[in-house]
Amino acid sequence: MNNDMQTMVVINPRTGKEDFNLPLFSAQNVVDIAQQLKQQQIQWWALGLSGRIQALENLADAMAEHKPKLVAALVNDTGRASESELEVDVTISGIHRWCKQAPGLLAKSEPWAAEIPFIELQQDYLPYPLVGVISPWNFPLLLSLVDAIPALLAGSAVLIKPSEVTSRFVTPFNELLSNVPALHKVLDIVTGAGATGQGVIENVDSLCFTGSVATGRQVGKACAERFIPAFLELGGKDPALVCHDADPELAAKALCWGSMINAGQSCMSLERAYVHKDIAKVFLTKLVEKVDALAHNYPDIHQGQIGPIISAKQVAIVEAQLQDAKDKGATILCGGEVRNLGGGRYCAPTVLTDVTPDMRIVSDETFAAILPVTVVDSDEQAIALANDSEFGLSAAVFSQNVDYAKQVASQLEAGAVSINDASLTALIHEAEKQSFKYSGLGGSRMGAESIRRFTRKKAYIRNTGVPSPWWF
Ligand code: NAD
């Protein structure tokens, strides 16, 4: 950071105090850094895949060595302890996983004969020179690196712009990155708010954006104007369908976790439940018992399950949605408020019922420890209500009949459906999935396609020595 760089103050979610000065990278800073990265990318590509794997493995080792510093910064970014530790561990294991998979996924194909037998074909994969990554505040480190790692392995340089709400992790990350010089030349981070993000879009050759639908629309338009690919991973309002033949205990346990983990601040949080009337009473009793037993991680950050609301702006959204639901007649079964604890704002673990589709808590993304439950007359009604949404990220289905559960899942307009479990895309990344509707755009972040998103496919088409019959 230059001494003359402008800064912006950032609030600590646990104390409510301004305790961090965020450097604001200007448009010119971004131009200069992007140019350097593009120059360095040529050597990075020339290094070959095995050299790039080695550099990424060195990064994983450096992250493991400096883990306490990374975790400490993430704790200040997010106000949560065990989740921060897990965030670092999951990012490191993601690097190892990609290093193992990349050779198989990026290999140039062997030549093969085309349908016209004297023509030989070969397929190559060439990286976009500079990939931009713009990330949100809910998993600051993980969501800054989740696309950066496969992009780097594919041979691209990467420029990251993390959320202005949670950029404290950048300082220890840059320190440890300087121990991996080959990588440091092709991976850089610029901090700032939307203006810095716009600068990134102006200077990269491909963009991965994770954030809200509202910002995603602007980002998608800006990328379209530059004719660069945009991979948009946006918001969700994931439904869970508890069918007539579901195991109520299992469903209650899974939904308690899937809606409350990370205080509901995950894109694939379960944000609405539809339960068949035949098992609604027993299911709701079990669910409320479990959710009500959860505690805030305050005053001891190592106790409890529910951390603070990370983004100060989100507090107003959550409070407005709760008020709207109460005004329109929802019944609060537990929780139902945002609490002030030691300066931090914590959403009490909440279950609501008697909710209707016109309530914002049912239609809009909430991103908090809140689960509205609708009792339905039939599983068909649950499917219709679940699909009545502008979002289509993921979903969950509970039924003791696996064939039936799969049949219900196939009718849901969502990119991934967990069956008899919740939010499994948080942990299982092998299968490809795309977002439906306004939850996103572009190729899959998961599975084999994820790494190939960063390459342009090139075909070599060789005449093996026969004069082409179509020549003049
Ligand atoms: P946000 O859209 O407010 O901000 C995301 C990023 O975009 C930030 O870094 C921000 O500075 C930047 N930005 C803002 N305006 C910009 C502009 N005009 N041009 C370029 N960049 C700009 O989102 P948020 O509040 O930080 O994150 C929460 C959202 O992220 C939720 O909607 C959540 O569902 C979504 N999310 C989605 C996934 C997924 O994989 N689908 C994962 C995590 C979070």
Image (cartoon, rainbow, N blue to C red):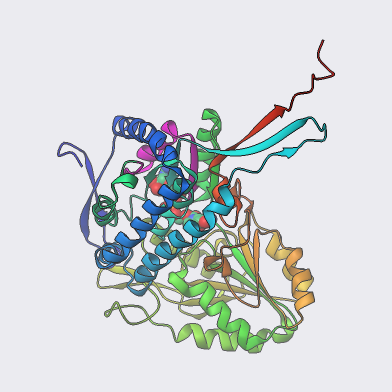
Using residue 445 as the reference point, say whether residue 145 is left or right of it: left
Taking the spot 53% from the left edge, 59% from the top edge, the residue there is 365
Q: Nearer the viewer, residue 176 or 3?
A: 176
Taking the spot 25% from the left edge, 52% from the top edge, the residue there is 179
Q: Looking at the picture, how far across and down is residue 325, in whole percent?
A: 54, 67
- Quadrant housing residue 186: top left
The magenta region covers 186-211
Q: Looking at the picture, how far across and down is residue 235, in whole percent?
A: 54, 55
As drawn, 114 above or below 299: above
Quarter of the image with the N terminus in it: top left
Taking the spot 25% from the left edge, 66% from the top edge, the residue there is 72
Is residue 210 a member of the stretch shown in magenta?
Answer: yes
Can the viewer see residue 378?
no
As drawn, 204 above or below 330: above
Q: Nearer the viewer, residue 293 or 74?
A: 74
Using residue 1 as the reference point, say whether residue 96 is left or right of it: right
As drawn, 366 above or below 204: below
Using residue 47 as the reference point, say whether residue 117 is left or right of it: right
